[in-house]
C-alpha cells in the first residue's frame, strides 16, 4: 500500500481497494493502522477520503537501519568471497 501511494500519489480508499483482493472496510482498517503510525495522512474531499504517503517517518527508520545495513553488506560480501574460494562438492 505504501509503495502504491509513493508511486501513484494520493489515492482514494476506493481506488486502493480496487487494487487489492479485500473489501473496503478491511482496507480502511489497514489504512487506520498506517495513519496511527504516522505513515499515511487522510484528507476528506466531499465523500471521498484521500490518503497520501508521509515519508518522513520512513526516512527516520532508514537512518536508524543504516549502520546495520553496512554491517550486513560487509558480512554477506565476506560470505560470498568464502563461497567463491570453497571447492564445489560433486553431487551425483
Image (tube, grey):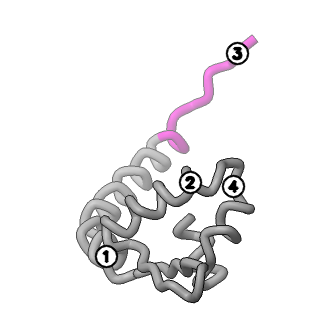
Image quarter (top left, top right, bottom left or bottom right) of the C terminus: top right
Q: Which of 29 and 5 is in front in this view?
A: 29
Lower sequence index among marks 4 and 1: 4
Mark 3 or mark 1, which is nearer to you?
1
Using the numbered discs, state the Cα–Cα distance from disc 4 to disc 3 in whole angstroms.
44 Å
Say which element carries label 2: helix
Residue at image mark 3: 91
Quadrant of the image occupied by residue 54:
bottom left
Lower sequence index among marks 2 and 4: 4
Say which element carries label 1: helix
Q: Is residue 89 magenta?
A: yes
Q: Which of 57 and 48 is in front in this view?
A: 48
Callout 4 crowding tier (Cα within 10 Å): few <14, some 14–19, many ≥20: few
Lower sequence index among marks 1 and 2: 2
The mark tally for this picture is: 4
Residue at image mark 2: 25
Say which element carries label 3: loop
Residue 21, above or below 83: below
Q: Which of 29 and 84 is in front in this view?
A: 29
Q: Is residue 63 magenta?
A: no
Image quarter (top left, top right, bottom left or bottom right) of the N terminus: bottom right
Q: Do the residues labelled 2 and 3 touch (CB within 8 Å)?
A: no
Residue at image mark 4: 20
Q: What is the magenta range?
A: 83-92
Amino acid at each position: 500500500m505504501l509503495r502504491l501511494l509513493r508511486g501513484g500519489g494520493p489515492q482514494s480508499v476506493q481506488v486502493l481497494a480496487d487494487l487489492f483482493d479485500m473489501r473496503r472496510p478491511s482496507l480502511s482498517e489497514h489504512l487506520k493502522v498506517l495513519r496511527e503510525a504516522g505513515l499515511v495522512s487522510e484528507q476528506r474531499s466531499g465523500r471521498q477520503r484521500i490518503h497520501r504517503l508521509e515519508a518522513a517517518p520512513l526516512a527516520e527508520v532508514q537512518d536508524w537501519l543504516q549502520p546495520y545495513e553496512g554491517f550486513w553488506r560487509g558480512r554477506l560480501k565476506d560470505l560470498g568471497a568464502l563461497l567463491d574460494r570453497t571447492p564445489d562438492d560433486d553431487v551425483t
